[in-house]
Amino acid sequence: MRVTSLKKKLAVIGAGAGGLAVLQVFSKHLEIFELTCFEQSDKVGGTWNYTEKVGLNDLGRPLHSSMYRNMKTNLPKEVMAFQDYPFPPHLSSFLRHSDVASYLSDYAEFHQLKKYIKFHSFVKSVGKEDDGRIKIVWEVGKSGDEEDIFDYLVICNGHYTTPYTPDLRGLENFKGDVIHSHNYRKPDQYKARSVLVLGAGPSGVDIADDIASVTENTVLLSHRKPNFNPKMRPNISLVSEMTEIIGSNRVQLANGDTYEVDSIVFCTGYRYNFPFLEENVKLRITNERLYPLYKHLVDARNPNIIYLGITKTVLPFPHFHIQASFAAAVFTNQITLPCEDDMLADIENDYKWRTEELGFSEKRAHYLHQLQWAYNDDLCELASIPRLPSSVSNLYLGVHQARTQDLQHYKEKNYRIVDEHTFVEV
Ligand code: FAD
């Protein structure tokens, strides 16, 4: 006699920090769910698993991690950690990638999450069946495809892997080497070269600093004039408004200045990419806006599919935990979602507010930063879980401030959370 489980089958794609947060939250509801997490690699931790290699992995797929050798976190461990699992006390506040990779592996062990993960399992397709359930096809190593049907899906495939490279006039004539930060690993090859780093976001600024530790001249291009005066290494020239590359190696700026450069590193960000979505569950992606995602999470047309970590400029791990708790509240029916039309109207209102009142471009459809605390509180209230203590937001903002004042040294500081509201520098 065949015994069929009455439990609902929940699939998770990706065992990075996002997927682990989902497994941790749903592992408290095993009376309702049977959990399966698909992870293409042999490890948890996703992008934090540094590799010297670039390009394709042994199976001919793009390497996932975007970490570089000397990378240090731009957030201190006191706020980065999942709220129920601190980083080891002996580590300083700003961490190496290997500390974070070990932390995530320890977190998975501590919560006994690895038993839900199918490693070496690459999801090839996700589609909707006639009854609304979700069919997933995955490839196990090199040994062929498997498939199964699931009731729910949470997608946590990470959003720092598919490079975004804008058009740059004259680039086709440039004779030096050109890479995207996804493929940047270490500065050694830039010794005695003059390098243009394009883009002054967190990675651009960090990578320019890393390269400037070995070169004589690094040019860092910020699209907008920075609204602060970052103290950087003296051999970094911060410039804005580049117009084109002229000839084989010259950068032309709008103010008439030119710089000769040997290499270019594009630190121009990443694109969302869900290559496994079949036509009947595909999201519309325009200018980095994913539509239709209710609360930047729930596919309003297929509400049994949730996308975690779409939001930009957030405090990732605690944020993922809150989003995962909201997902659990939805899939356990603790929360009843509005009907499809009301979710679509809510999405439109949020978008109008961002673009018309806050003046954001479409590219910032999922940008939070200062908005993240109100967003988190809203989800916490709906999911009936405690809010993040204000010491976390205070320290996050304090570090942001320290960074704008002294880019070169802010990671040398150490912090301690004192109580629910307060942190101190130690
Ligand atoms: P990922 O870590 O990318 O994990 C996604 C997982 O999905 C991977 O394991 C991947 O193998 C798997 N996967 C993808 N597609 C498939 C598929 N088809 N089938 C099966 N498996 C699949 N955050 C901070 O908190 N502090 C920092 O200082 C910080 N610095 C950063 C610096 C860099 C250079 C980068 C790139 C990111 C940084 N982040 C930082 C953000 C970081 O991305 C998040 O902290 C977080 O780790 C993202 O987790 P994730 O689970 O969303 O994605």
Image (spheres, rainbow, N blue to C red):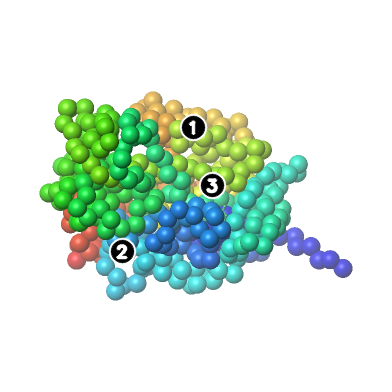
Q: CA distance from mark 2 to mark 3?
A: 27 Å
Q: CA distance from mark 1 to mark 2?
A: 35 Å
Pick whichever, 277 or 390, lies toward us.
277
The answer to whether 374 appears left or right of 396 in the picture is right
Q: Is residue 121 above or below residue 225?
A: below
Q: Is residue 12 above or below residue 165?
A: below
User: Marks 3 and 2: in contact by CB < 8 Å?
Assistant: no
The residue that label 3 is drawn on is 307
Q: Is mark 2 within 8 Å of ligand 1?
A: yes
Answer few, some or many: residues within 10 Å of disc 3's Cα (few below 14, many 20 plus, some between 14 and 19).
Answer: many
Q: Is residue 317 above or below residue 376?
A: below
Residue type at mark 3 is: Tyr
Q: Percent x, y for residue 46?
A: 47, 59
Mark 3 residue element: strand
Q: Earlier in the sequence, mark 2 or mark 3?
A: 2
Q: Nearer the viewer, mark 2 or mark 3?
A: 2
Q: Earlier in the sequence, mark 3 or mark 1?
A: 1
The residue that label 1 is drawn on is 286
Q: CA distance from mark 3 to mark 1?
A: 17 Å
Mark 2 residue element: loop
The residue that label 2 is drawn on is 95
- The N terminus is located in which quarter? bottom right
Ligand 1 is found in the corner quadrant, namely bottom left
Q: Nearer the viewer, mark 3 or mark 1?
A: 1
User: Marks 1 and 3: in contact by CB < 8 Å?
Assistant: no
Query: Which numbered dot is residue 64?
Result: none
Q: Percent x, y for residue 329?
A: 57, 52
